[in-house]
Image: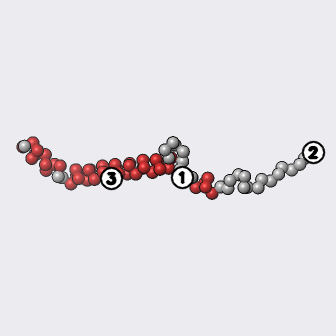
Amino acid sequence: MTGNVAAEPALESPVWRWLAAIAALLVILAGAVLFWRRRQTGVAGVPTIEPPLLRAQSPPDLVPQPSPPASL
């Protein structure tokens, strides 16, 4: 009992509370990053969200290609 009573003031100090709050925020942030990366890559590693550059491009079959000049 006396060991627990002596340890209580140290655990109630503001420094330990700040450290615990920072550790909790880091755990939440790491979980959010893992969730976001999993959401972007999908289950099998195939992207489920298209990157903006690929989404902005037209499909190649819809873009008219100029024919090469006929040189004989």
Q: CA distance from mark 3 to mark 1?
A: 27 Å
Numbered disc total: 3
Q: Secondary structure at mark 3?
A: helix
Residue drawn at (17%, 49%) of the image: 11
Which mark sits nearer the N-terminus, 2 or 3? 3
* Horizontal and vertical percent position of residue 26: 34, 50
Name the amino acid, label 2. Leu
* Horizontal and vertical percent position of residue 7: 13, 46
Residue highlighted by disc 3: 25
Asked if the residues shown at circle 1 and circle 2 are in contact, with their CB atoms under 8 angstroms apart, the answer is: no
Which mark sits nearer the N-terminus, 1 or 2? 1
* Horizontal and vertical percent position of residue 40: 50, 50
Residue highlighted by disc 2: 72
Residue density around tag 2, few if under 14, some if 14–19, many if 20 or more, within 10 Å: few
Residue drawn at (38%, 48%) of the image: 30
Q: Secondary structure at mark 2?
A: loop
Name the amino acid, label 3. Leu
> Is 53 situated above or below 72?
below
